[in-house]
Amino acid sequence: MIPVILSGGSGSRLWPLSRESYPKQFLPLTSEQSMLCETLQRLDGMAGLSQPIVVCNEQHRFLVAEQLRGMQVTPQAIVLEPEGRNTAPAVAIAALAAQENDKDALILVLPADHVIEDINTFHQSLKVANESAQQGKLVTFGIVPTAPETGYGYIKSNQSYDKSSDVSALAVEQFVEKPDVTTAESYLSSGDYFWNSGMFLFKASCFLAELEQQDAAMLSLCQQAFSGAVRDMDFVRLDNNAFTKIKGNSIDYAVMEKTNKAVVVPLDAGWNDIGSWSALSDVSVSDEQSNVMSGDVLIEDSQNCYIRSEHRLVAALGVQDQVIIETADAVLVASRDKAQEVKRIVERLKLDDRSERLHHRRVFRPWGNYESIDEGERFLVKRIVVSPGASLSLQMHEHRAEHWVVVTGTAKVTRGEEVMELHEDESTYIPVGMRHRLENLTDVPLEIIEVQTGGYLGEDDIIRFDDVYGR
């Protein structure tokens, strides 16, 4: 059984903490581990598991690689999508990758941003699903509903679920869209509807055969994108020309709603997809007034609030049913009943071409990170941290000069034809148009303060001549 981790989402409903360049699956939202790491960790103890395949956006490749390395997990592959095309193409390409070693490999498809509290029950459901998948069924996991939730799609089985009986796979009768409250209440009372979790288990060969029947054009383009892929370490860079021709579609619409081989395994294990701030609040510890607080938060005479501080003190007095999220460069205040609509704010930021939808003040790169400290009309000050053994690209800028001051560590600096070593409290100057490179050859982080000056200070003013990360 090969875990296939889908890690391509943007998590816009959890803005401003989740951003396009650093979305929620890479954040530690419910524990000290990121959600991606939690997804892999909950498979610990399962027998017969192979190394995972992770499907992610190309811009997140080093985030995925670094977090897997931190877990000491060596993936079979990290498949890089040039653009998002929904789950059906992602799963199809993962299935093709899985078949390279075993034509009948079982693939366990898991989104990277879910919470499952009862790991033992989850493992038991996987064993039940395994039996059906070995018989050629396409298994989905249906979450036993606890409320008339209108934010999820539902799966109708051919019989009611009896919590007192052993879990078994049930034939799928119908997939249904997100209902209104009255309809959701009827689903809950009937006992034969489940929340659609987006988790699956099946033979790669069976899924690909079904996809060929339902959408042969999609499968053909997926095969072209995979066969034309370039291998770069653990990364599989799909053929851009073929992949971008694929018409995006979900695995439900493309296959599961049309096949006669779909079965659903009930899962009652404390599942949550953390699709909003309210959902995150539901899986967090609250006080006697139903408030959830994270970080430096002071609260008085307030009820049913989720308040999270990342950098500064947040004080709240006399508020109810609010979501308040503070980050270094943005603050969100929203009514809890509007938590599902935070995406509207992100869409406004996109229309206004604001960087707050894309990046935090601290931006992560494969070599480390940088954080903007101050800026004015013709200057920008950054704190740059270069990881041990890492190196920035050999580059130059057409519009800005840079001043570097080493704060901690030792820097190897290429400055035109000159190569030098800078220690703490030493500095150098990089004129406009000069080739330069910053390297950390030591085993401790290197920290510098960079002052940029010039008429244009955008991140796109970089001409790269050599880069170990293939950018």
Image (cartoon, helix red, strand yellow):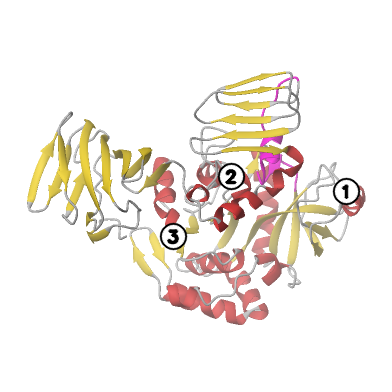
Q: Quadrant of residue 240?
A: bottom left
Residue 65 against residue 119 in the figure, above or below: below
Query: The N terminus lies in which quarter of the figure?
Result: bottom right
Q: Tell me if 208 is positioned left or right of 374 in this view.
A: right
Quickly name the residue at label 2: 15
First in residue order: circle 2 vs circle 3: 2
| Label 3 to label 1: alpha-carbon separation | 40 Å
Specify start and end residues of the magenta stretch as a single range: 267-288
Task: Tell me how far mark 1 sits from mark 2, CA to CA.
Answer: 31 Å
Q: Residues within 10 Å of mark 3 (few under 14, many from 20)?
A: some
Query: Mark 3 — residue?
Result: 58
Q: Which mark is residue 188?
A: 1
Query: Does residue 5 appear anywhere in the picture?
Result: no
256 in relation to 30, above or below: below
Q: Is residue 442 visible?
A: yes
Q: Amino acid at mark 3?
A: Glu
Query: Spatial distance from mark 2 to mark 3, Cα to Cα?
Result: 21 Å
Q: Secondary structure at mark 1?
A: helix
**Residue in the foreground of this view, choosing between 47 and 38:** 38
Q: Nearer the viewer, residue 190 or 448?
A: 448
Residue 142 appears at what percent x and percent y? 75, 53
Q: Amino acid at mark 1?
A: Leu
Q: Residue furthest front?
A: 377
Magenta-span inclusion, residue 284: yes
Disc 2 residue type (three-letter): Trp
Q: Residue at x 18, y 29 (%)?
A: 424
